[in-house]
Amino acid sequence: MTDNGIVSGSLMSYLAQADRDFLLDRAVLRRLPAGTSLMNEGDPTDHVLVLLSGWVRVYKNTRDGQVVLFALRGPGDVIGDLAALQGWPRTVTVATLQDTEFAQFTHEGFLACLRDRAAVSIALLRQLAVRLRDSEAARLDYATMDVAQRVAAFLVRLAEAHGSPSPEGVVVDMPLTQQDIADSIGGSRRAVARALKTFRDRGLLVTGRRTVVVSAPDVLRRLARTVPDGT
C-alpha cells in the first residue's frame, strides 16, 4: 500500500493528483455494501470501475463447480478495463468484500479518458504490466511449489501489495477466508488450514476475523523458495 491507502501498482498509484482529478471528474461516484456483485461472468461490457475504498474479489466459476480466485483488488485498482478495450463480455465475476466506493465510467467514457489524457493511458499500461508479472509469478508457484509453500508465497505477496507496517508485523486488513486462499492457490481448504496452523504455531502469522498479521515475512519468503522434497 502507498502512504495514502492506494494499492501499489494500481492505476491511481501512477497518477499525479491533477490526473486523478481529471479522471474522477468524468465518473459517477457510487457506494455499495459488502457481498454485492459489481460484474458477472458473461455479462456484456458496459462500464469500467476505479475502486476508491474497500476491497473486492475477482473470481471465476469453472464448469465442474470449482471457484478460481484470480485476484483481490483494492483502492486505486481499475476493473473491467480489458473488456472495455476489446469489447469482450465479462470473463470473471467481481464481488465486494467490504463496503466499497468506486468511480463508474461508461465504456466510451473510459476510452475517451485514455484518448484525452496520455498520463492515464500510461498508468493503465503500467498497471497491466504489474498484473502480467503477478500472473506469471502465480503460474510458477503452481508448477514448482507444494501447498504450504504456495500459501507462504501468497501471504508474502499479500503483505507486500496490501499490508501496512505495525509493531507486530505487516497487517493486511481485509475479510479473507481460508477458502479464498485455497481458491487463489489451487489447493484444498483443509490443506490451507493445516499450513496456516503451522505458521501460527511457529509465530509467523496471526489471524483474526478480518485481519491477517504477517509477523515474519522474511521467514515465509524463505519457506516459499525452499524446494520441496520429492518434487
Image: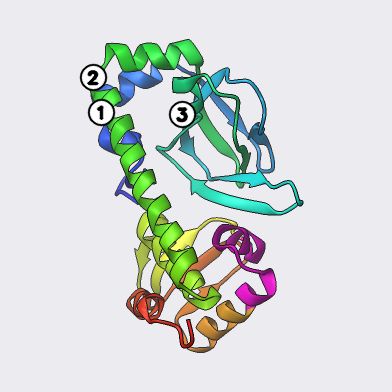
The magenta region covers: 177-193
Q: Based on the picture, tell me whether residue 210 belongs to the magenta stretch.
A: no
- Discs 3, 1 touching: Cβ within 8 Å: no
Q: Which residue is mark 2?
A: 118
- Mark 3 belongs to which amino acid? Leu
Residue at screen point 33% across, 30% down: 124
Quote the CA–CA distance across marks 3 and 1. Answer: 15 Å
Q: Nearer the viewer, mark 3 or mark 1?
A: 3
Q: Nearer the viewer, residue 106 or 82?
A: 82
In front: 51, or 208? Answer: 51
**Marked residue nearer the N-terminal end (3 or 1):** 3
Pointer 3: what residue?
82
Cα–Cα gap, marks 1 and 2: 6 Å
Q: Could you tell me residue 167's position as x and y percent?
A: 35, 73
Q: Is residue 83 above or below residue 25?
A: below
Decide if residue 155 is in sight here: no
- Disc 1 residue type? Ile
| Secondary structure beneath label 2 | helix
Whether the magenta-drawn stretch holds residue 186 is answered as yes
Within 10 Å of disc 2 (Cα), the crowding (few <14, some 14-19, many 20+) is few
Q: Are marks 2 and 3 in contact (CB under 8 Å)?
A: no
Label 2, label 3: how many angstroms apart (C-alpha)?
18 Å
Q: x%, y% of residue 106? A: 51, 14
